[in-house]
Image (tube, grey):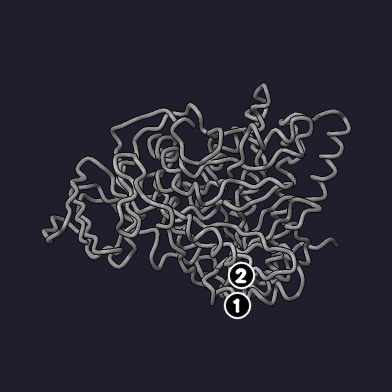
Amino acid sequence: MRTLIKNGMIVTAVDEFIGDVLIDGEKIVAVGERLDSIADHTIDAQGKYVLPGGVDQHVHYSFEFKGERVRGFETSNAAVAGGTTTVVEFVNQEQGKGMADTIFDMDKNEVARQAMADYSYHAVVCDPVDTTFEEIADLPSKGISTVKLFMAYKGMAFHSDDEALYKALRAAKEAGVTVMVHCENADVIDFLQKKLISEGKTDPYYHAESRPAMVELEATQRVINLAAMAEAPVYIVHVTAEDVMKSIRNAKNEGLPVYGETCVQYLMLDESDLSKPDFEGAKYVLSPALRTKADQNALWKAVGNGWLNAISTDHCGFDWASQKHMGVDDFTNIPNGAPGVENRLGILWTYGVNTGKISRQRFVDLFATTPAKNMGLDHCKGHIGVGMDADIVLYDPNESSIISNENSLHGVDYSTFEGYKQEGKVDKVFLRGKLMVDDEEFIGEKGDGKFIHGEPFALCFENTKEAIGLNQSRVELPG
């Protein structure tokens, strides 16, 4: 099956031009101007932008919080409908079981038959014993190029202490596995949570007071030092605050292989959303917590300048009525997270591209190209080029709509961006050459998505050799 997309404005991370894209089967076989190749189907994309399918490197379709589980891959059609064709899922290691075994048992029993987007996996350390760290060396052979550790959530299985972080960093650097870290000081959060609850401060807003930006900053600086001691690269996930971003930027400017992302919600929402009446604030209980308008502005500047290299969603689909209300009398029992994967393209285009905060090319880089590079998926994802998977989005800039949960596909009972305007629409989406979205309507099927092999020594390793030798000077010990 050969499909020719003609006359669209093709946008990549490095250029844009009016041209054509020829798809043969699952791959792009030609990109250029006035292609006259014989095709089984021709689509006139005049007036539309031709974008690579998005790569969301940070989603949760299997996360559990205090016995409650998010919506799973049966809702991954929401990603595709929003122009994201590849997602990377965090899978928490089961106690007494290997990380890869946990991942691929879930893949076999659940994901492979349900996924409607292509997908890859992050391993997550939850059983910090020596055999877990020894397993990191084998992850690349199984297509797993990243491992995550949580510094937050004291007392929960997925919390890691400094010893676990250091061991993981040392093991990962030898294997070419990228270590990703959720940075928050768990002990301080635990103290502040208990203090606030004892004072009767139980509303959702106090979630932010229990997790101030300083707990994120302290943990970020600590893991940067641990990575320096291990002479290993590190990737900081969901950066929320200006000072945290500056810590990452400064370390990178010193020559250290330190990288980070932010998420759509931290560019759009702020701590005042947690104060919404009638327990509506629970919808915005995320970790790390929402920050200030000043932090939002700093993060927009950071993604525009490349100080943070990707914009993800941390998509986490908990119901408000049946799950978030667990914490109606105690904010610490509110499941953390919010849906967002369906709205990433529309929000970033409307409030980033159309306001001049980021260019179209920078948008593509943050939305697709660099996330693919971070995850070792750039051998087939994140770019419109010959030999790449035919993951293509046709975006019509001339339409507009209001985001509403009523027409969302993410499977939960609220939208994080309810009532926000979206300028433009996702008109068509191709996943490896198959038309999955036509005139905004999802027409794909469960099982259309497939596992994509992540390659080791991805983007975060590009300057590692140069950084070795500089690292020890980064560590500041008390005199």
Residue that mark 1 sits on: 138
Question: Is 140 placed above or below 395 here?
Answer: below
Could you tell me which secondary element the residue under label 1 belongs to? helix
Position of residue 144 measured from the top left corner of the image (x, y, whole percent):
55, 69
Q: Residues within 10 Å of mark 2 (few under 14, many from 20)?
A: many
Marks 2 & 1, CB-CB < 8 Å contact: yes
Left or right: 211, with 388 as reference point: right
Find disc 2 in the rendering and name its residue. Answer: 100
Estimate the x, y position of residue 137 in percent, counting from the top left. 62, 77
Pick whichever, 108 or 223, lies toward us: 108
Marks 2/1: CA–CA distance: 9 Å
Query: In the figure, 112 relative to 318: above or below?
Result: below
Q: Which label was assigned to residue 367?
A: none
How many residues crowd mark 1 within 10 Å: few (<14), some (14–19), many (20+)?
Answer: some
Image point (53%, 46%), residue name: 313
Q: Quadrant of residue 224?
A: bottom right
Q: Secondary structure at mark 2?
A: helix
* Quadrant position of the N terminus in the picture: bottom left
Q: Residue furthest right?
A: 198
Quarter holding residue 194:
top right
